[in-house]
Amino acid sequence: MERVRVNYDTLVQITKAISTIRDPEEIVLITVEGVTHALNVKGCSLFLFSPGSEELKLAGSFGLSQEYLKKGPISALRSIAAALQDRQPVAIYDVSDDPRIQYPEEARKEGVASILAVPIVVGEHLMGSMRIYTATPWEFTINDVNFAQAVAQIVGMSIEMCRINKGLKESIDILKTMRDPKTVAYKKRTPYEGVPKGFTRQEIAVATAER
């Protein structure tokens, strides 16, 4: 029950943090770092869907190397496509032996073992996808999936509000207002820097112990 409580607390803190922010870049970076710490995983990334190219464009990430982020274009039709086509979460237990992975060799070199992909949907609009990466093979629990879906929904609505406030036509246009995430997403930070205020080190320690 403690693990569930910590995830719930993190969800509340992320919601509080991004509800007062109008900068999409900051919203994305708070989200991916908060999720990484909450689940004690290797990293997290957030992509926006580009209808014109049928690709997922990186909006921000935490815990992943620049080399991995620059591995190549992410095809919405080849890279864990079911998460977008069916608009349902997809868990990949072994990325090295699953045809749904577009870049299995790059994932292996990065030290990624398992991936959870959840769609970001606002209303009937498919906005993108959030992906969670583990360093060891991991069977994601229903609580992990529910937590990821809730965060994806909240960050999706926040990005949509940013789009409206900025007078942009499409969600993907948000990327034009942000710095290149491949150059700013991965930074040398302390293990707790960027975690939403109010999420204490003691809570993180409990989550780590439960993991």
Image (cartoon, rainbow, N blue to C red):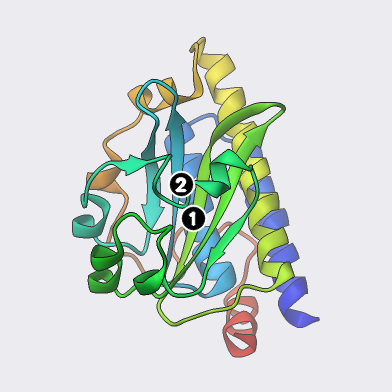
Q: Compared with residue 17, is residue 9 higher up or lower down, i.e. above or below?
A: below
Q: Residue furthest bottom?
A: 209
Q: What is the secondary structure assignment of the residue under circle 1? A: strand
Q: Is residue 10 visible?
A: yes
Q: Image point 42% across, 67% down: which residue? A: 98
Per the model, the C-alpha gap separating discs 1 and 2 is 6 Å
Q: From the image, which quarter does the C terminus lie in?
A: bottom right
Closer-to-camera residue (163/203): 163
Closer-to-camera residue (74/170): 74
Whether pointer 1 and pointer 2 mark residues with C-beta atoms closer than 8 Å, the reply is yes
Quadrant in which residue 95 is drawn: bottom left
* In the displayed structure image, the side of residue 65 where residue 189 appears, left or right: right
Q: Which mark is on residue 122?
A: none
Q: Amino acid at mark 2?
A: Leu
Task: Return the residue at label 2.
Answer: 46
Are there few (<14), some (14-19), or many (20+) residues within 10 Å of tag 2?
many
Task: Tell me residue 182's x, y (percent).
Answer: 25, 46
Closer-to-camera residue (172/165): 172
Task: Tell me residue 183's x, y (percent).
Answer: 22, 46
